[in-house]
Amino acid sequence: MFTPRRTATLFAALLGLSAAAQAQFTVTGPGATIPAANNNAGTYATTLPSIPATATVNVPVPVFQIDSIEVLGLSHTYVGDLTMTLRDPNGVEHLLWSRPAFGNGSIFGTGGDFTGGDYTWVESGAPNDMPSVTGGDLLPGEYNQEFGTGQVPWNNGESGIYNTPLSGISGPAGNWTLVVYDWYTTADDGTFTSWKLVGNGAGGGVFCFGDGTGAICPCGNSGLPGQGCQNSSGTGVGLSAVGNAALTADTLQLRVQGGPANKFGLFFQGNAKVNGGLGSLFGDGLRCAGGQVKRLETVQLDAQGASATSGVVSTLGAASAGTTLYYQFWYRDILASPCGLQFNTSNALEVLWN
């Protein structure tokens, strides 16, 4: 059983983002053909079509949030039988929109078409919503993200697709994929020429990855780019941040994902990089944040292996203006940890407070 005292005992073994740490990125990916539905198209919404359209971009930095998704030259008949998602490098899909107007006067959804122009989706504030009733073509322009605008809204987590607002999507560096599912008729198909992913990611403030670019993980258990060493879930934990590291208006939140489900962990800070930022062996992972170490907040990972700080980070760590601090996440991995040491760590973040 996990207890704070046991956490303190293990943590004792350590001994030892401002805006500058973030930057907006834009990456452009290829286009794709959106295949018409066929006999293996699946059953809405429990069984996904087996052959969706996919187009992948490589994001070279950990992602803190998504600002917009632009799909260029998008042409398709029957918008109402399509679902569009964004798949992160961990394989988790986030819904952009699904079958507009389905169930609201139509078994197909809206019968309008994408007309071959450029379409951009943002979380909110766009001049257009996806249609909630059947109607005409969807003209090129900017649209709001939707989780189902007919009488059949998407159930969060259905078929492994989550209703995550764009600003809440984060993940490691690596391959991010636009996915388009065609659910209904064999008489339609479509295409898009390219797409752009615009988001907020790490600048120079992220370091000490368990992907072979730092110290080698303890038993060869490398994670994917932008993560810590691999854990029992088959991936590593990626640590990222959103918000501003300003003492007068601290909105910084530390976030992790990719951990073993429902396990306990601890956000902590140090005032020095270990081994020049390459890290040193520690459990099944690497210790990256060292020097004067301070425990910040104990959390429990959710069923998807994710969590975030809820307290004010500068207060928890007694940060002062002009200081650079280093953050990391330590977590338990009891049942099947790769190296058998039953705990692991994330990558690390460097934050300059102002």
Image (tube, helix red, strand yellow):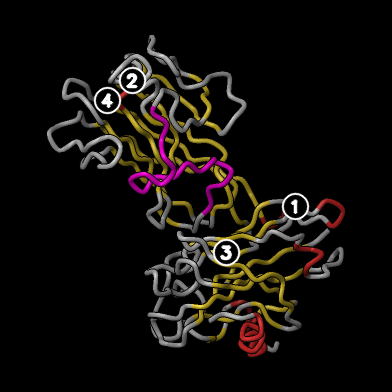
Looking at the image, is mark 4 or mark 3 nearer the viewer?
Answer: 3
Residue on which the image places disc 2 = 109
- Is 83 positioned to the left or the right of 296 in the image? left
Q: Which x, y percent locates residue 325? A: 74, 70
- The mark nearer the N terminus, 4 or 3, is 4
Mark 3 surroundings within 10 Å by alpha-carbon count, few (fewer than 14), some (14 through 19), many (20 or more): many
Residue on which the image places disc 1 = 251
- Is 318 positioned to the left or the right of 113 in the image? right
SS type, badge 2: loop
User: Rounded to the nearest whole Å, what is the CA distance between mark 1 and mark 4?
Assistant: 43 Å
Q: Is residue 139 above or below residue 39?
A: above
> Which amino acid is tagged 3?
Leu
Q: Which residue is rendered at x = 52% and y = 78% of the image? A: 332
- The mark nearer the N terminus, 2 or 1, is 2
- Is 61 positioned to the left or the right of 212 in the image? right
Q: Which residue is rendered at x = 41% and y = 58% of the image? A: 90
Residue on which the image places disc 3 = 239
> Which amino acid is tagged 4?
Gly
Residue on which the image places disc 4 = 190
Q: Which x, y percent locates residue 319? A: 82, 67
Looking at the image, is mark 1 or mark 4 nearer the viewer?
Answer: 1
